[in-house]
Amino acid sequence: MSTAAVPHADAPSSPGRGVVLEARNIVMRFGGLTAVDDVSFQVHEGEIVGLIGPNGAGKTTFFNCLTGMYKPTSGEVTLGGRALPPRPRAVVTAGMARTFQNIRLFGNMTALENVMVGRYCRTSSMALTSILRGPKFRREERESIDRGRELLRFVGLDDKADHLARNLPYGEQRRLEIARALATEPQVVLLDEPTAGMNPRETEEAMRLIFRIRELGMAVVVIEHDMRFIFTLCDRVLCLVRGALLVEGSPAQVQSDPRVIEAYIGGSEDDDISADELTEEDVEVLHAEGVDVEPSRTSARSENGR
Ligand SMILES: Nc1ncnc2c1ncn2[C@@H]1O[C@H](COP(=O)(O)OP(=O)(O)OP(=O)(O)O)[C@@H](O)[C@H]1O
């Protein structure tokens, strides 16, 4: 991926910026499994925060707790200092929108209609007004169409307004999902694997788009497996492992933290490979993934095999 070509937008430093989203001691249990284990974090205005971790670490479950899809077993989420009720619609109305790991669009609706759906939480027309199609309804509908077209332009889909969502290529569907999230006028946008399945060019475009979303004043929280993407994009990165927050810091700190490297190469109780035993091949793979690891940490295993 040629993300090196993408300039890092002026990263606002967190201190001095207000906290917009805060999660305190979130725990989510499914029967005997603790999927999120006492995780707390803060997101500041205009900040881009990355959430990484191996498969099953609890990243999506944490998003689901933030967005009211799940009612956490315990803990609290606040947006702009106000406690968020664990109901998705209330969360969207309060100012937090999200996209999903598996794209969730209305396939048989046009791109424009999909974005307009996102506007509904900001329009006041009630069912009766809609049925009667009175002047207020028509004015709000006009405004929704105009705003929808503006957002399609923002994500680079202005020429696709009348295309059915299901007919759009994968990368464009992902951008359409982002446009629909932006239509809710959020303060914070949560993106769950926004570049999954994208080619390098689409990934680079996605990065530029997220920087432009931040320039509009929104904070962004991103789950991604593409480390290079995360470390280039984010101001701050959190790494979850087995539901718990393992490391939090700047991309440089997280990238070079041996605990993160261990978590990714399987240095768990199920696997006896530790960061001290990296082969040169391991290091090459980690470098390709954007994880910084010193050559001195390698062992002679590359010569001897495992
Ligand atoms: N609704 C559910 N019921 C029971 N277990 C669940 C549920 N949702 C998630 N889990 C479990 O919680 C753990 C965390 O899953 P989650 O999907 O949050 O991880 P993740 O970090 O997002 O993984 P990935 O990177 O693979 O998407 C997993 O063990 C998963 O099987």
Image: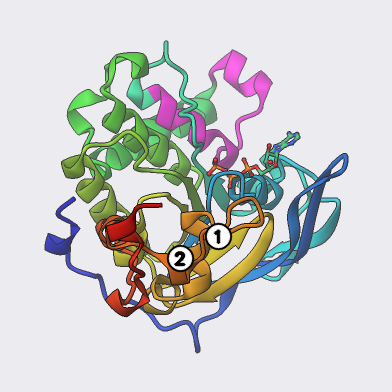
- At x 27%, y 59%, the residue is 303
Q: Which amino acid lies under the numbered mark 2 shown in the image of this protein?
A: Ile
* Element at label 2: helix
Residue furthest to the top in view is 108
47 lies above or below 180: below
4 lies above or below 114: below
Residue 107: image quadrant is top left
**Residue named by callout 1:** 267
Residue 165: percent from left, percent from top: 35, 19
Residue 183: image quadrant is top left
Q: Residues within 10 Å of mark 1 (few under 14, many from 20)?
A: some
Residue 80: percent from left, percent from top: 64, 68
43 lies above or below 5: below
Q: Residues within 10 Å of mark 2 (few under 14, many from 20)?
A: many
Residue furthest to the front in view is 304
Quick one: 48 or 143, which is closer to the camera?
48
Quick one: 137 or 258, which is closer to the camera?
258
What whole-number distance in Å separates the C-alpha atoms at marks 1 and 2? 8 Å
**Residue named by callout 2:** 261
Determine whether, in the image, residue 136 is placed left or right of residue 289.
right
Residue 261: percent from left, percent from top: 45, 65
Residue 118 magenta-highlighted: yes
